[in-house]
Image (cartoon, rainbow, N blue to C red):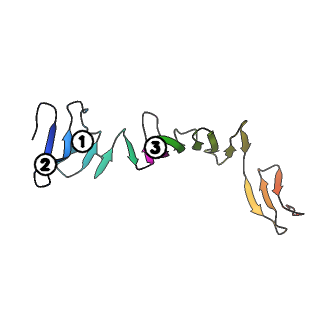
Amino acid sequence: AGNEANFFIRDATNGSTLPFRLFPTAPSNSLTIQGDGDIGVGTNNPGGSAAVTDVQLEVTGLALTTGATSGVAIQSRSGGNVEWTMASLNDTDGLIFDESGVGQSLRIKNGGGIQLLGGAPTVVNVGSLWTSASNALCFNDGSTTQKISTGVGSCP
């Protein structure tokens, strides 16, 4: 059924609800169902059984977003506000953890380095990580060994 305002499918068996509605301002290729059953959202040429292009999906507090930049972001939301974001936005950034109101707190670089961010960024490049026989946690970046120990633990 339809009228001058929009196109819709009415469920006449369930109190005339409108489970499917298409508004006149919807962009081209908003929803495509091909002859083989493939479904496209935002594309008229889905590459698989379901393809979603340049959209944001929000599932009760969780959003998975992509956009003009390459990459993906997963966000936790509360009341429409972003609480935290985990993102890999392009080929050079690595994986970023960002707390709303605090900013980026952790970045795992493409080469494996870990960057802890606070006031001034601290970079920790972990080459090796192990525990010693004397209960120390040892880090070695190839030239320097650092240890974390609650007592007299040592690193070889």
Mark before the other along the chain sequence, 1 or 3: 1
Nearer to me, 32 or 14: 14
Mark before the other along the chain sequence, 2 or 3: 2
User: Based on the displayed image, in which of its 4 quarters is residue 130 positioned?
Assistant: bottom right
On screen, residue 44 versus residue 103, left or right, reads left
Q: Which residue is mark 3?
A: 79
Q: Neighbour class for label 2 at 10 Å: few (<14), some, many (≥20)?
A: few
Nearer to me, 155 or 2: 2
Mark before the other along the chain sequence, 1 or 2: 2
Residue located at (48% from left, 45% from top) = 77
Q: Neighbour class for label 1 at 10 Å: few (<14), some, many (≥20)?
A: some
Q: Position of residue 41 (x, y in %)?
A: 29, 43
Nearer to me, 25 or 83: 83
Q: Quadrant of the N terminus?
A: top left
Q: Which residue is mark 2?
A: 16
Specify whether residue 45 is in view. yes
- Residue span colored magenta: 60-80
Q: Amino acid at mark 3?
A: Gly
Mark number, residue 114 = none
Q: Which residue is mark 1?
A: 31
Q: Position of residue 60 (x, y in %)?
A: 41, 50
